[in-house]
Image: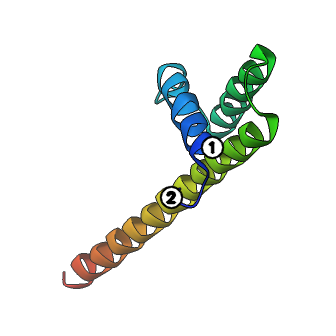
Amino acid sequence: MSEKSRQVQDLVHTMGDRLHHLISPEDKPEVVRVKIKDVSEELVASGDRDRHALQEATEFLHHQWESLQHSISRTGHRAKSALDSAWTHVAGKK
């Protein structure tokens, strides 16, 4: 994020603050993507934001969300693999 312009950084923070109040733990990944888009469109409609900077901030948030989902998925797969291995080890000792 440090390579982003100050304007984009400010928009990411503004959008993040709004999303913090809109996103719930029960939201599916696609719902979060739609909420990011909705907040972006809301800021575009206000007319006082640079569209290019807003598009860049929106893309950044989408990318961060996808990265987080991928990381969580990898962690889940590693945990399942470790549990399977442990179960095999325990069950094999009997």
> Residue beneath label 2, please?
2
Query: How far from the left and from the top, in percent, is residue 43?
Result: 71, 22
View extreme (left): residue: 94
Q: Height in image: 83 above or below 17?
A: below
Q: Height in image: 2 above or below 51?
A: below
Query: How far from the left and from the top, in percent, is residue 8?
Result: 63, 43
The number of callouts visible is 2
Neighbour class for label 2 at 10 Å: few (<14), some, many (≥20)?
few
Q: Amino acid at mark 1?
A: Val
> Residue beneath label 1, please?
8
Image check: 39 left or right of 77? right
62 vs 70, nearest the viewer: 62
Q: Residue at x 26, y 82 (%)?
A: 89
- Mark 2 or mark 1: name the one nearer the start of the chain: 2
Q: Secondary structure at mark 1?
A: helix
23 vs 37, nearest the viewer: 37
Q: Secondary structure at mark 2?
A: loop
